Amino acid sequence: MKLPIYLDYSATTPMDPRVAEKMAQCLTLEGNFGNPASRSHMFGWKAEEAVEIARRQVADLLNCDPREIVWTSGATESDNLAIKGVAHFYSKKGKHIITSKIEHKAVLDTCRQLEREGFEVTYLDPQPNGVVTPESVQQALREDTILVSIMQVNNEIGVINDIEAIGEITRANKVLFHVDAAQSAGKLNIDLERLKVDLMSFSAHKVYGPKGIGALYVCRKPRVRLEAQMHGGGHERGMRSGTLATHQIVGMGEAFALAKAEMHDENRKLMALRKRLWDGVSDLEQVFCNGDFDQRVPGNMNISFNFVEGESLLMALKDLAVSSGSACTSASLEPSYVLRALGMNDEMAHSSIRFAIGRFSTEEEVDFAIDKVRTAVNKLRELSPLWDMYKDGVDLEKVEWVSH
Amino acid sequence: MAYSEEVLDHYENPRNVGKMDDSDSHVGTGMVGAPACGDVMRLQIKVSDEGVIEDAKFKTYGCGSAIASSSLVTEWVKGMTLDQAAQLKNTEISQELALPPVKIHCSVLAEDAIKAAVADYRNKNT
């Protein structure tokens, strides 16, 4: 077993070696290096063919038409293109956008930018279990709403939203619906033929593909129009100019094809590993799962260890590559905005750790992680005055703390 | 973030972890910080009739630098008089532990904790 153990698959995934091999074939003179836009010779035609095969592989996983897939540099660009593209194209129709407080920064910061341009944005509160309800979307709709943007799976807590139900509401009200699916593609069944989703963002590197490539699904029926954010040679039907990166695209296509073939078995394995992890730590007192326990993607487990501070816990877990809901980089700690939006108090947010297991995780690694976590939590609680007080029956909520 | 050797040493092997009987008139207790801010220190001293700190204990909820700062202070104040302990400066702590600027507040908290413990002892014994 090689240390440290990678348990941060929600941040990024290592590439599947089968993907890397395909990509390597599209780089050098001997390989498929041509510009897919070159119409006058074999090199271009071959590259274009590879790109179109990959486009079909991506479309196959999502059950949509390949012509509805637009290549981008990643989910951040897809989010930007979808939200700004719709807002700018349909701005005469209305100026109101609905999203949620627990979206990825690529959505939230794009919405902030649109607010500076004069758009109005409603940020929905999730339920305490992390779900953004269709009812809350329904209630926030206005006459001038043009777009709803809600993620399918949250990156920190892994909780799944009911985008099918939200899509029914938006379509019935003639409002466009964008879904950030960076954390759900390759993990959940996505059937775009059935879902009433107009735009969907994808990333390759969360699905064992390369970084630097993603896609945006743009629905053809009913037709969605976008104002391009990147201008140039008119690639991708004018929606996103720029020479297509054949090797990256081929990598994403292969990664999505592998996901389609193996997702079912992989999910079963990940569910078992996640259960093993939870069973291994949850009998420690005052341990809580953040976000809905069942309605989440298989690989994610976000856990708070009460009375233990997150950064010191990460320090003790130096053999594990995990991430914390707390970022102590300044005089005042900044707990995760996602956990805070669930209504969690700051100290619980500070004690949270996200474990994200994936394709290459093993039982041995999970057992090692359990052992490390148990030792660290017990040690730090021995050091914690809050744990003492809890054990003495002191209500910490009632203590008058001297803030600094 | 990279931690200094000194911080790692105190974090891995914290000195003088524990709790003293708060009702003992020879014991002074200082508790500073707040859970919401991410650190709480409880520092206790046991003082002889001559006003010399005979023993010190701490417990800290916080990052590695906060744990190290309080651990270091318990080592330093043993054998000091109350006046000497009350004059301990956070800059001495942060220098000894080579704390980066974003962690200076941990040493400030440790200084506050020892001051609070001395004040508590004096309060009890006047």
Image: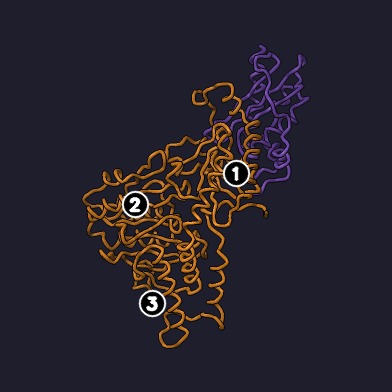
Estimate the spatial distance between the alpha carbons at disc 3 and disc 1, rounded to whole Å: 47 Å
Which chain is represented by purple in the image?
B
* Host chain of mark 3: A
Q: Marks 2 and 3, Cα distance to the nearest angstrom?
A: 35 Å
Tell me which amino acid carries mark 3. Gly
SS class, disc 1: helix
Task: Give yes or no for contact between labels 1 and 2 (Cβ–Cβ under 8 Å).
Answer: no
Instruction: Answer few, some or many: residues within 10 Å of disc 2's Cα (few below 14, many 20 plus, some between 14 and 19).
Output: many
Left or right relative to A381: residue A173: left
> Residue A103 in the image: x percent, y percent?
41, 50
Disc 1 residue type (three-letter): Val
Q: Cβ–Cβ below 8 Å for labels 2 and 3?
A: no
Picture disc at residue A338:
none
On screen, A202 above or below B111?
A: below
Mark in the foreground, 1 or 2: 2
Q: Which residue type carries mark 2?
A: Ile
Q: From this viewpoint, is residue A122 visible?
A: yes
Rate crowding at label 1 as few (under 14), some (14 to 19) or many (20 or more) other CA atoms within 10 Å: few
Coordinates of residue B23 in the picture (x, y in percent): 65, 14
On the image, numbered disc 1 is attached to which residue?
B102
- From the image, tell me which residue sits under label 3: A233
Residue A163: numbered disc? 2
Nearer-N-terminus badge (2/3): 2
Chain letter tied to orange: A
Chain under callout 2: A
Instruction: Please identify the quarter of the rendering in which residue A124 is found.
Output: top left
In this rendered view, identify the residue nearer to me: A118 or A198: A198
The residue shown at (63%, 38%) is: A374
Circle 2 — which element? Answer: helix
Residue A212 placement (x, y as % from top left): 49, 65
